[in-house]
Image: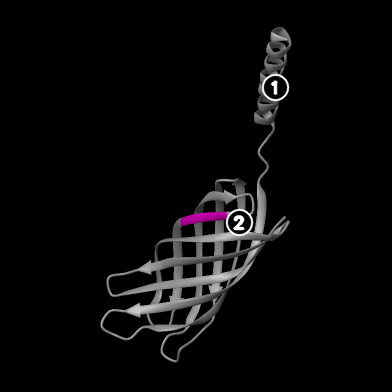
Amino acid sequence: MKNLTLATLTAAVLAAGIATTAQAQQPVQATPYVGADAMFWKLNPDHHSSRNDVGLRVNGGMKFNEFFALEGQLGTGGSDGYADLDYLAGIYAKGILPVTPQARLYGMVGGTRVNADYGGSDSDVSYGAGAEMDIAPNLALGADYMRYLDKSDYTFDAASVGLSYRF
């Protein structure tokens, strides 16, 4: 009985090692994705009242593994009568923290160019955080908050909610 238990345990350890080695040798497959969001932006100038409205943001990227992706964003739209958002365009590194197989938290950092009637065209380092949850096999619902511009005399932020599709 003791020999049978030892043999079974040895076989299980060897099988696990072979499976892990085989899994480690498989190439990592990058997964492209696209999405669209309602973008609730806010331009907050120093010494003036803030300006805000709703625009549209589209994004796309490549998820290289479960922890890292590169993402590009384009946004436009919205006017409160004083400030119009012509466009924003940026590219970001996205660090991903899987919480469950269906839910993830993430942080992003990169660069953005924003063109708005209030401040003209400006670029800055941008950063933000968000979460997403799968609602179907290739479809996720997500929300994030980004600081696109942080200038000495104003900031430009946006909270977004939308859907993304993984290919």
Tell me how many marks there are. Answer: 2
**Which residue occupies 66% across, 24% down?**
21
Front-lying residue, 39 or 18 = 18
**Which residue occupies 48% across, 71% down?**
159
**Which residue occupies 42% across, 85% down?**
83
Q: Which circle marks residue 44 in the picture? A: none
Q: Position of residue 102 (x, y in %)?
A: 64, 54
SS state under label 2: strand
Q: Does the magenta stretch include residue 165?
A: no
Residue labelled with disc 2: 61
Q: Where is residue 44 in the image (x, y as percent from the top left)?
A: 35, 78
Circle 2: is it few (<14), some (14-19), or many (20+) Cα within 10 Å?
A: many
Point out the residue furthest to the left here.
Answer: 47
Marks 1 & 2, CB-CB < 8 Å contact: no
Point out the residue furthest to the front here.
Answer: 1
Tell me the kind of residue under disc 1.
Answer: Ile
Q: Where is residue 40 in the image (x, y as percent from the top left)?
A: 50, 77
Magenta residues, start to end: 104-108
Residue labelled with disc 1: 18
Relative vertical location of residue 57 with respect to residue 68 in this rendering, above or below:
below
SS state under label 1: helix
Tell me the kind of residue under disc 2.
Answer: Gly
The image quadrant that residue 18 belongs to is top right
Relative vertical location of residue 167 with respect to residue 156 in this rendering, above or below:
above
Distance, label 1 to label 2, CA atoms, is 34 Å
Point out the residue furthest to the bottom here.
Answer: 81
Q: Is residue 98 left or right of residue 20?
A: left
Circle 1: is it few (<14), some (14-19), or many (20+) Cα within 10 Å?
A: few
Q: Is residue 107 magenta?
A: yes
Front-lying residue, 129 or 152 = 129
**Which residue occupies 45% across, 66% down?**
146
